[in-house]
Image (cartoon, rainbow, N blue to C red):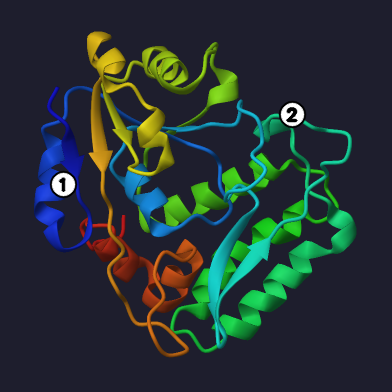
Amino acid sequence: MVERQITGGSVQDSAIASLNVAVGTIAAIHQPNYIPWLGYFFKIAHADKFVFLDNVVYPDSGFVNRNCIKTPSGSAWLTIPVNRKGRRGQLIGEVETDDTHRWTERHLTTLRCNYGRAPYFKETLALLEPHYRVIAGSGRSLADFNIGMICSIVAYLGFNPQFIRASELSVSGHKTDLILDICRAIGARTYLAGTGWAKSCQEDEKLEEAGITPVYSSFSQQSYPQLFGQFVGNLSVVDVLMNCGCLGTRRLLSTKAEHG
């Protein structure tokens, strides 16, 4: 087996070239996280089809309901409270936000306080705020909220993959078997995977035997201008958008700078 790797950042040309020689439809799969980091959008930007993994058990920790932004004191979590009492084992797509905490207004206030002086504050807040207003008191699921936010950011950046929810597919299994089932269901021949914890659980030989080529993204966060002193990497994409805008964010994703 030959492991192919796509790298973001300083070797952007070879990164895109590697994906250009990928076989057939390129698929990426990920849980629907809350305002994810830039590496999440790197996978979206280079996939033909992106599957939101909403049919697996909601994790006890992770990024489905939280992510980090930057404040004068360093990085800080923005966390969405969810209803979990008596719902052990619920799937991600079944999780509901707990609106008794008025979290939407708190998150908006936090963004205003910490990014009010960012160069792209107004346009980024205008992109995000409608989603917080819609979900407030509406009973929308956490996955609905996250997916809506992600899709708006992707459209703003000018990317156009096909988005699919795993729960809409007739798929089953765990780990590699689930990946394989999803790739078969959507007609993917290349699977763009991350290099984190999931890699250690993935059986590449099983994918290759089924005619699906695994390709790994080793996206690396480049530094960019930030507020509040020393650079902090791997924050929510919101930090990138506030400081770099659309074109700057696209450049960090190793894509063409033109919007549209």
- Please tell me the numbered disc located at residue 122: none
Q: Position of residue 53 (x, y in %)?
A: 53, 31
- Residue bearing mark 2: 89
Q: What percent of the width, then of the height, locates residue 92?
A: 66, 34
What amino acid does circle 2 point to? Gly
Q: In the picture provided, is 70 more to the left or to the right than 198?
A: right
**Label 2 CA crowd tier, 10 Å (few <14, some 14–19, many 20+):** few
The nearer-to-camera label among 1 and 2 is 2
Q: Residue at x 82, y 41 (%)?
A: 84
Quarter where residue 112 is shown: bottom right
Q: Residue at x 43, y 51 (%)?
A: 154
In the rendered view, would you say 169 is above or below 163? above
* Quarter residue 50 falls in: top left
Residue that appears at 61% across and 26% down? 55
Percent x, y of residue 177: 44, 15
Q: Name the quarter where the N terminus is drawn.
A: top left
Mark 1 vs 2, N-terminal side: 1
Q: Three-letter amino acid code at disc 1?
A: Ile
Q: Is residue 48 left or right of residue 113?
A: left
For the C terminus, give its image quadrant: bottom left
Instruction: Determine the residue positioned at 50% across, 55% down.
Output: 36
Residue 16's tag is 1
Q: Of residues 105 and 175, which is closer to you in this image? A: 175
Q: State the count of labels.
A: 2
23 or 133, which is in the foreground? 23
Q: Position of residue 32 (x, y in %)?
A: 56, 42
Look at the picture and state if 176 lies above or below 142: above
Q: CA distance from mark 1 to mark 2?
A: 39 Å
Please report contact status of discs 1 and 2: CB closer than 8 Å, yes or no. no
Question: For the residue labelled by badge 2, is the local secondary structure a helix, a strand or a loop?
Answer: loop
Q: Quadrant of residue 224?
A: bottom left
